[in-house]
Image: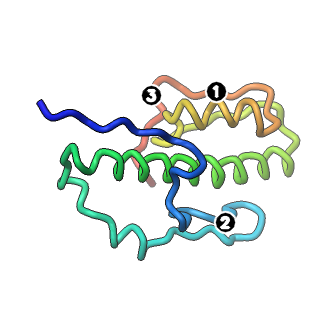
Amino acid sequence: GEELEQVRLGEDFHHKADIMSGSLYSDDSFRINWDLLDSLPHPNEWSPQLFSYYANLANSVQQDLEKVALDLVGGLQGATGCKNVVLVGGVALNSVLNGRIRRESGFEKVYVPSGPGDEGI
């Protein structure tokens, strides 16, 4: 098979423009950069040559998601003073984000049910 190039992730391995930004909680400034998303290659155009590109994209989305979600959850904790939170929905399965929520949001306990659901409204 074809060899995949080594990918190094770090601060310099991030899109220059945020894919998601702003706050969902404090000031309703949350935005998704649809122009950037629309300009990306179709995800079914996978090839080993694009591995670094897709790794970069995944890293960027993860970083932006963590920033926005931590703002939301931290704002909710600050406003309610609650010690515990239950996370449900598809994003609740993001273990990296959940770890950061546990460490950084101010909640003492974070619970994610084994079947958090993602049915929408």
Q: Observer-nearest residue: 43 or 74? A: 43
- Cα–Cα gap, marks 1 and 2: 25 Å
The residue most toward the left is 1
Position in image of residue 85 (x %, y %): 71, 34
Label 2, on which residue? 22
Mark found first going from the N terminus, 3 or 2: 2
Position in image of residue 47 (x %, y %): 18, 47
The residue at the point 55 percent across, 62 percent down is 20
Picture quarter with the C terminus: bottom left
Q: Amino acid at mark 2?
A: Gly
Label 1, on which residue? 111
- Cα–Cα gap, marks 3 and 2: 29 Å
Label 3, on which residue? 115
Position in image of residue 5 (x %, y %): 30, 38
The residue at the point 65 percent across, 34 percent down is 86
Q: Is residue 119 above or below residue 87?
A: below
Position in image of residue 83 (x %, y %): 83, 32
